[in-house]
């Protein structure tokens, strides 16, 4: 009796399992509807908007009372903001696939993938009055425009900096060589950003120091060039104490002295300096990788009107100045600079300087530097290489 | 039992619920024991099937698919690419060995601490001290896993408590890395190892120890030939906890492990960062296989029957 019963239960379990699996097949195989279309007319707000953004992009004053650009928006539009932050662009791409977010602030290495996968919808920039004032060199770039359709509103841009502890690191570094030198006196106390996109930092260093490799764009690497970057990063692996993706953990490591030199963002530098830590950050002589971010709207957004209102709110010079100033990056318009005093430090509006920063871009097989005689390595190859480097 | 029939009228008189569907239903169930049992078991069995079997089957199947590297969408095309990659690539061999080694070291450390500790609790400590010790062991379980891992992040940090403790003997904290991860994991799973061993020891009658002593058995001999065979099931149960929990951990490793990669970190990196669910599924089959082998070995020793 007992055996018969368990056998029957087993069959039931299998039946349930196969149903679940079949259901999974159904959703996995579903095709996307052909190209989503942009909104033509703005309606009333839905009363809520959920936002996925980098830390420091959606501040409601709970961290610093003077940095609050959410409360005003909520009062003005009636759209209640819920925000979630992410640590790497890859995390943003996989979170956007959940369809739980209306708006995302995406860097170039995420935005292209989001557009290609149909996870975000085209944006009708005529519905966003402040769009007109935004720098022309930020508009219609490969990371925010796809198939000649604009997919979002530029937010701000900045560079990945070399941060170091002034009490330990001497002489002060001037080059990224400080984090790639096999004989570094700071072995075990070096940090690097934990994402495959960090390979571009090594490629940038090689581009300047080993011209023989012929790297013209750190995001367009053929097999040999990628192998050279991977070798350099494997040397660096011996120096790295920990890789960071959580910016608070990175700041803590610099505070305790477990890390003394490595990649950083202006927002971390500002935070540590405000805490009176002996920290300095530079833009090394090789230049740097960086980001140029875009506010985008999910293709499955439940609150499209509120999403458009948020995009307008963030393009508004006053809000944009506050938000980009808080994060430590250049704003998106000249008008925003009237609300900031440090625009010169960030070379805001200086198209030539902006061209020197290598903005995060998703590497693809078709070489971004225009070469047609070779295939470049794509992001999957970079991801694979990254786990190999970490070992 | 057959003399009692639910349809027999109540002695008190006609009750209004006598012929209700509920009453008839309960009467039916009362008479049909098999149906009763089936209904009782179907809910938990359904749950078990859904959670364990379906999840495992889904995992197995995903491993045979691939993902579009650019858009991150899953392509349902049957192939063995992920499995061969996981089996053939040197990276996965290194990480598997590292994870396995860590799990074994953590288990050995936990057992080395837990056995004497549990023995003291069960056989030496006074009733009062015993109760205090049980509370002391259970107390850390009230705090979140994350809180404890982050606490160890401060303890292991430069200028942290470990640095201060080791300073007199000229040593420093191991810092963030594999050693840090081993220490933290050993701490995290210790209560799960102590408790089953303590329970097993409590069931060993003191008279057996006295008998062994009366027959001339010294401490070591008594331990090896009397206590150890009796508490082996407890030891095995504890080791299953520390071993399997370490095998799958990636959060504590991320927090205190520095740049160390474990199998769990690779699964996490492929799900959360690379968005390559099929490869993650293929990787997660490794710890699954290891645990099956471990359980098979344990079963062979016969310890599971005494659990």
Image: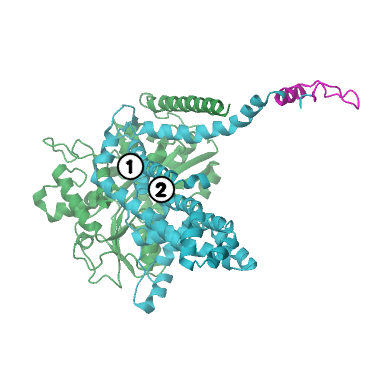
Chain colours: A green, B cyan
Principal SS element in the magenta part? loop
Residue B248: give its label: 2
Residue B127 position in % (x across, y down): 64, 66
The subunit letter for the residue under badge 1 reads B
Q: Secondary structure at mark 1?
A: loop
Residue B274, label in figure = 1
Residue A189 visible: yes
Q: Please state which of residues B306 and A205 is positioned toward the viewer in this rendering.
A: B306
Q: What's the residue at 43%, 24% (across, down)?
A: A22
Q: Is residue B125 above or below residue B84?
A: below
In the displayed structure, would residue B29 be above or below residue B266?
above
The answer to if B42 sits in the magenta stretch is: no
Judged from the image, the secondary structure of the residue bearing numbered disc 2 is helix
Whether residue B9 is in magenta: the answer is: yes
- Dot 1 and dot 2 within a common chain: yes
Above or below, A72 relative to B212: above
- The residue depicted at 52 percent of the width and 47 percent of the height is B306
Compared across the picture, whether B196 is left or right of A26 comes to right
From what the image shows, is residue B270 above or below residue B40? below
Q: Nearer the viewer, mark 1 or mark 2?
A: 2
**Percent x, y for residue B204?**
57, 58
Is residue A332 shown to the viewer in this render? Answer: no
**Is residue B36 toward the left or the right of residue A286 in the image?**
right
Q: Residues within 10 Å of mark 2 (few under 14, many from 20)?
A: some
Most foreground residue, B255 or A327: B255
Magenta part of the chain: B3-30
Give the residue furthest to the left: A212
């Amino acid at each position: 009796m007992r055996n018969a019963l368990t056998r029957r239960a087993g069959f039931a379990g299998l039946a349930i399992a196969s149903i679940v699996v079949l259901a999974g097949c159904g959703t996995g195989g579903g095709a996307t509807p052909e190209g989503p279309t942009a909104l033509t007319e703005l309606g009333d707000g839905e009363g809520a908007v959920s936002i996925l953004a980098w830390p420091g992009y959606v501040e409601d004053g709970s961290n610093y009372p003077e940095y609050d650009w959410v409360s005003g928006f909520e009062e003005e539009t009636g759209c209640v903001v819920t925000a979630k932050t992410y640590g790497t662009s890859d995390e943003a791409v996989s979170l956007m696939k959940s369809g739980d977010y209306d708006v995302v602030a995406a860097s170039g290495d995420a935005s292209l993938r989001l557009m290609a996968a149909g996870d975000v919808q085209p944006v009708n920039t005529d519905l966003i009055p402040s769009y007109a004032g935004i720098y022309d060199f930020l508009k219609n770039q490969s990371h925010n425009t796809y198939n000649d359709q604009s997919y979002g509103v530029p937010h701000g841009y900045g560079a990945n900096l070399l941060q170091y502890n002034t009490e330990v690191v001497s002489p002060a570094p001037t080059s990224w060589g400080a984090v790639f030198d096999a004989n570094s006196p700071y072995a075990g106390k070096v940090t690097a950003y934990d994402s495959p996109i960090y390979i571009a930092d090594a490629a940038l260093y090689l581009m300047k120091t080993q011209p023989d490799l012929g790297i013209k764009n750190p995001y367009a690497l053929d097999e040999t060039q990628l192998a050279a970057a991977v070798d350099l990063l494997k040397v660096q692996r011996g120096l790295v104490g920990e890789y960071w993706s959580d910016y608070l953990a990175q700041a803590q490591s610099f505070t305790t002295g477990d890390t003394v030199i490595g990649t950083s963002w202006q927002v971390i530098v500002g935070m540590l300096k405000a805490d009176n830590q002996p920290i300095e950050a530079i833009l090394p002589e090789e230049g740097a990788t960086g980001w140029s971010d875009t506010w985008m709207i999910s293709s499955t957004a439940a609150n499209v009107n509120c999403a458009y209102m948020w995009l307008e709110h963030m393009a508004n010079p006053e809000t944009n100045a506050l938000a980009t100033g808080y994060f430590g990056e250049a704003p998106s318009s000249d008008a925003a600079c009237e609300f900031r005093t440090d625009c010169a430090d960030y070379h805001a509006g200086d198209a030539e300087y902006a061209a020197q920063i290598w903005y995060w871009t998703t590497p693809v097989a078709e070489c971004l530097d225009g070469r047609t005689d070779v295939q470049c390595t794509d992001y999957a190859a970079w991801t694979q290489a990254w786990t190999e480097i970490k070992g | 039992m057959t003399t009692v029939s639910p349809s027999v009228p109540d002695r008190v008189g006609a009750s209004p619920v006598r012929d209700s569907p509920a009453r008839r239903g309960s009467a039916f169930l009362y008479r049909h024991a098999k149906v009763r049992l089936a209904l009782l078991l179907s809910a938990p069995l359904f749950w078990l099937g859904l959670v364990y079997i379906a999840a495992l089957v889904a995992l197995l199947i995903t491993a045979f698919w691939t993902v579009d590297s650019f858009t991150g969408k899953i392509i349902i095309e049957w192939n063995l690419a992920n499995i061969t990659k996981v089996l053939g690539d040197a990276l996965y061999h290194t990480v598997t060995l590292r994870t396995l080694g860590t799990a074994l070291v953590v288990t050995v450390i936990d057992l080395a601490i837990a056995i004497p500790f549990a023995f003291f609790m069960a056989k030496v400590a006074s009733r009062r001290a015993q109760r205090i010790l049980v509370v002391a062991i259970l107390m850390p379980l009230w705090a979140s896993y994350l809180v404890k891992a982050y606490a160890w992040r401060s303890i292991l940090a430069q200028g942290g408590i470990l640095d201060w403790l080791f300073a007199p003997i000229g040593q420093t904290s191991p810092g963030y890395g594999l050693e840090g991860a081993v220490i933290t994991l050993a701490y995290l799973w210790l209560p799960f190892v102590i408790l089953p061993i303590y329970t097993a020891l409590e069931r060993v009658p003191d008279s057996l120890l006295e008998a062994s002593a009366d027959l001339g058995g010294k401490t070591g001999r008594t331990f090896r030939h009397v206590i150890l065979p009796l508490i082996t099931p407890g030891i095995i149960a504890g080791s299953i906890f520390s071993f399997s929990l370490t095998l799958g951990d990636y959060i504590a490793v991320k927090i205190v492990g520095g740049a160390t990669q474990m199998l769990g970190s690779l699964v996490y990196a492929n799900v959360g960062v690379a968005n390559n669910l099929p490869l993650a599924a293929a990787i997660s089959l490794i710890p699954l296989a290891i645990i099956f082998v471990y359980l098979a070995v344990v079963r062979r020793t016969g310890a599971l029957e005494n659990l």
